[in-house]
Amino acid sequence: MIHIDGFEQFRNDGALSSSLVRADYLPGPYAITAVAGRGRLAAATALSGKNITLTRKHPFTGAQFSVGFAFTFIARGALATVTLGENKYTLWLDANDGLARINDTRGGALPTITRWYYYEIEVDRAAGVMRLFINNRLDIEHPITADLAGLTEASVTLGWRAPSEFRPPDRVDGDNQYWDNDDAVKTFDDLYLRDGDHIGPLMVSTRFPTNDKHVEWFLAATGGSHSASLALQPPKPLDNYVASDTIGQEERFNSGQELANDNPVIATGVLVLARKSPSLDAKLGVFIGGQAGAALREDDRTLESEWRTQYVCFEQVPGDTVIGVKQADFGFNVSST
């Protein structure tokens, strides 16, 4: 079970906080910006801001749990916190020696300012340890005090502050202590959360539909294609959408957009912003493949009457080659309950 997000769908979004909430993220009180052209690739979108926090929960039912993300910074401070039950474990960069730490356990790598690195935190249930990998190199093993025996969920917060009990203040003014570096701009890209072990650095390619292959739903906007309506950034769900109330009706697309690179495919998925009428007794079927390239994989999702962004991810199979993914169709249908 894996969640992958390159944040491209949030580009140009003037109501980003609301969009993050409907995508099952919990943003903090400070403004987050979806910065176009500031991701790891020149044209990519990243999430950035000062004092930002962005939280997401994910199942942790197996032997291991992992989270990975790309991160760049202009001042050393906290990167992320993993919450296991009542216990919090924070990854942070010390402002004095520059080394990474998980709570009070120090690593040996020295990340450089303004450069991108890929961080992965792996929780090992049986061993009772948390591991930090930086660019796929093991840097820290930190003992876990939380009881993991019956834990079925982990919570990950990007940003936030390092626990003050594990670090000296950046400055002291009388009786007051300040941690200024946590106020610096932090920028995140290419996130994954996985109910399993770490998988190494990844780069997310978000490819929007560019060609209608087979469309049966109703198109609300006139004078355009279904793929163009669904590829708007930001989306306009009240005025530009497709809809259907007929079981089995399908929308199938492909994309002429390139992948980020020719590296092996780790996973695939379809991202859909959707809702249903309260009177419609049906689900949303989401699929990839079936016409060319990868074999058909599909999943049903229960819809609500409010807009919600659905992430439907599939683990890698042998048919997921670079060529296969480029050729594969993807889409959705009205699925019976």
Image: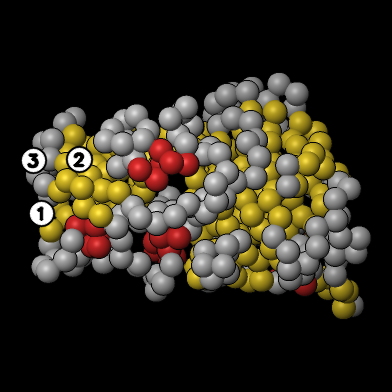
Residue that label 3 marks = 246
Of labels 2 and 1, earlier in sequence is 1
Pick whichever, 67 or 160, lies toward us.
67
Q: Does residue 292 appear left or right of residue 72 in this picture? A: left
Of labels 2 and 3, earlier in sequence is 3
Residue 202's x, y, as percent? 60, 46
Of labels 3 and 1, earlier in sequence is 1
Amino acid type shown at disc 2: Asn
Mark 2 residue element:
strand
| Model colouring | secondary structure
Within 10 Å of the Cα at label 2, are there few (<14), some (14-19), or many (20+) other Cα atoms? Answer: many
**Tags 2 and 1 touching, CB below 8 Å:** no
**Quadrant that contains the C terminus:** top left
Task: Give the residue at x 80% y 63%.
Answer: 112
Labelled disc at residue 333:
2
Residue 222's x, y, as percent? 11, 68
Mark 1 residue element:
strand
Pick whichever, 239 or 83, lies toward us.
239
**Separation (CA) of disc 3 from disc 1:** 11 Å
Residue that label 1 marks = 218
